[in-house]
């Protein structure tokens, strides 16, 4: 497991074994040890590993051509994937631009919004409001829209400093409001910030419909979503949904936006869209935005691998598997099973203060006191320690700091959409064992009778 002789570097020096192969929800290292991919990697492998139908379609495309530059050729995989994507998204989202990943998708969405505003004679619109906490990517433009202090602060002098509003973490609120009223309260923060910035200066509002890494599967009250749409319409502000993590069926709908009947102006997708078979992402937008930009001389933006035929053949096969295997429906059904299992863990472990999510994007959060939801002491390094304890036992989960990246601990459980009820039981058994070990190490209580 030592990486002392490796020439590679990533985020840390945490040692990891060599991956040998993947199959379904499982990954195997070179010693033969099996791991349940309880987070789909980084919430990517939506249809599981080594799907034979996807691999066969990629092989067929490899036998034809692996690259055709989009300015030189149209390709059937890119055209077919664009058409399939439009068919699976809400009416009014009818133009697709392909990228290679989530940060590229977010930046592409913002640049399309900006170029559209310019074509409408609204060149003063340049401010993009997002939420805190949030995560939208690691390139400079996407990072400026991200609300996660440890990732952003080292580069803050190099960023413009885009405005933020509070994410609707209503579970932390201590007031007499109903959840509906709380949702409206958080939505009105957006209206207040638009007025503060000057509506003529605000280009877009960027949000994750269900929170990702920075907020741990945070779901706002239902009232929030429609009011945000109304506020954006009131001021001519474009609504961009970052569905990089939530898209492609993860929450039990193809887009999480569908849960609330919302049609954003632009959607950013990646991760499960290509499901780990090839680097792939997309923005999906209305022709109302795209056509004026093309008429004005074209979209001043692009990437070398945009619309790569091999990546698009993989993406098309992934979407076909989602439909043919009924995986979006399975995400909704198994999501209920998973949430029930997490709530049982909450009964056993008093230091689990909240369980949340939608479909197969779920999370639980550690606290030191359920009454106040105060976080555990940072010295416990709980978000990292539980991940290691689970990994040792053959379960991969994903964690981050909850409160803006500087305090709190949440854990994402987001297995592939092919998962069964029995396999969720296996996840719960390993997770319970890891939580027992963590509780013993940290001197935290366990409700043995639960």
Image (cartoon, rainbow, N blue to C red):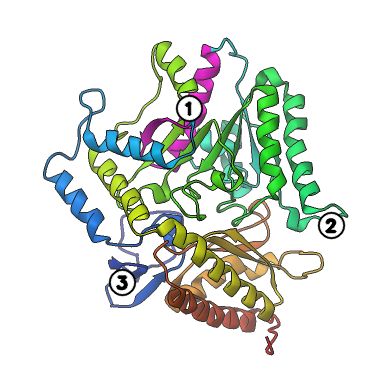
Question: What residue is shown with label 2?
Answer: 174
From the viewer's side, name the closer residue of 326 and 115.
326
The answer to whether residue 302 is left or right of residue 182 is left
Q: Secondary structure at mark 3?
A: strand
Say if 10 sits above or below 18 in the image: above
Residue 163 pos. (x, y %): 67, 33
Whether the residues at callouts 3 and 2 have beta carbons within 8 Å, the answer is no
Q: Secondary structure at mark 1?
A: loop
Q: Main secondary structure of the magenta part?
A: helix
Distance between mark 3 and mark 2 Cα atoms = 46 Å
Question: What residue is shown with label 3?
Answer: 29
Q: Which residues are magenta?
A: 93-119
Question: What residue is shown with label 1?
Answer: 286
Distance between mark 1 and mark 3 Cα atoms = 44 Å
Distance between mark 1 and mark 2 Cα atoms = 40 Å
The answer to whether residue 135 is left or right of residue 42 is right
Please indicate, yes or no, whether residue 317 appears anywhere in the rendered image. Answer: yes
Residue 369 pos. (x, y %): 78, 70
Q: Residue at x 66, y 55 (%)?
A: 406
The answer to whether residue 51 is left or right of residue 240 is left
68 is within the stretch colored magenta: no
97 is within the stretch colored magenta: yes
Quadrant for residue 81, please give it. top left
Say if 446 sits above or below 251 in the image: below
């Amino acid at each position: 497991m030592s990486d002392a002789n490796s020439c590679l570097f990533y985020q840390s020096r945490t040692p990891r074994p060599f991956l040998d192969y993947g199959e379904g929800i499982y990954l195997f290292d070179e010693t033969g040890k099996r791991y349940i991919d309880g987070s789909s990697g980084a919430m990517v492998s939506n249809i599981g590993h080594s799907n034979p139908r996807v691999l066969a379609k990629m092989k067929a495309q490899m036998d034809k051509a692996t690259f055709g530059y989009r300015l030189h050729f149209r390709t059937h995989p890119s055209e077919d994937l664009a058409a399939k994507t439009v068919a699976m998204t809400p009416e009014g989202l009818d133009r697709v631009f392909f990228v290679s990943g989530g940060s590229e998708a977010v930046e592409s969405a913002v640049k399309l919004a900006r170029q559209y505003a310019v074509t409408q004679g609204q060149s003063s619109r340049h401010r993009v409001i997002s939420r805190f906490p949030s995560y939208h990517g690691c390139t400079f433009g996407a990072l400026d829209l991200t609300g996660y202090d440890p990732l952003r602060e080292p580069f803050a002098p190099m960023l413009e400093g885009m405005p933020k509003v509070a994410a609707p973490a209503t579970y932390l609120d201590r007031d007499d409001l109903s959840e509906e009223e709380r949702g409206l309260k958080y939505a009105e923060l957006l209206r207040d910030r638009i007025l503060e910035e000057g509506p003529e200066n605000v280009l877009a509002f960027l949000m994750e419909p269900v929170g990702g890494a920075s907020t741990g599967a945070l779901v706002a009250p239902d009232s929030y979503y429609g009011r945000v749409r109304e506020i954006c319409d009131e001021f001519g502000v474009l609504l961009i949904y970052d569905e990089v993590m939530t898209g492609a069926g993860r929450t039990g709908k193809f887009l999480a936006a569908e849960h609330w009947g919302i049609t954003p102006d632009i959607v950013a997708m990646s991760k499960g869209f290509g499901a780990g078979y090839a680097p792939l992402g997309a923005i999906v937008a209305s022709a109302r935005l795209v056509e004026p930009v093309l008429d004005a001389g074209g979209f001043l933006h692009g990437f070398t691998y945009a619309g790569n035929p091999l990546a698009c053949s993989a993406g098309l096969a992934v979407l076909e598997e989602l439909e043919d295997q009924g995986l979006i429906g399975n995400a909704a059904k198994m999501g209920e099973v998973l949430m029930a299992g997490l709530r049982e863990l909450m009964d056993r472990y008093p230091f689990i203060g909240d369980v949340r999510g939608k479909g197969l994007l779920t999370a639980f959060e550690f606290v030191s006191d359920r009454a106040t939801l105060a976080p555990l002491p940072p010295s416990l390094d709980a978000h990292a320690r539980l991940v290691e304890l689970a990994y040792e036992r053959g379960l991969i989960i994903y964690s981050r700091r909850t409160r803006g990246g500087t305090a709190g601990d949440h854990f994402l459980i987001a297995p592939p959409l092919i998962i069964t009820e029995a396999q969720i039981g296996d996840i719960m058994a390993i997770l319970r064992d890891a939580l027992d070990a963590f509780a013993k190490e940290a001197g935290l209580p366990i409700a043995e009778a639960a």
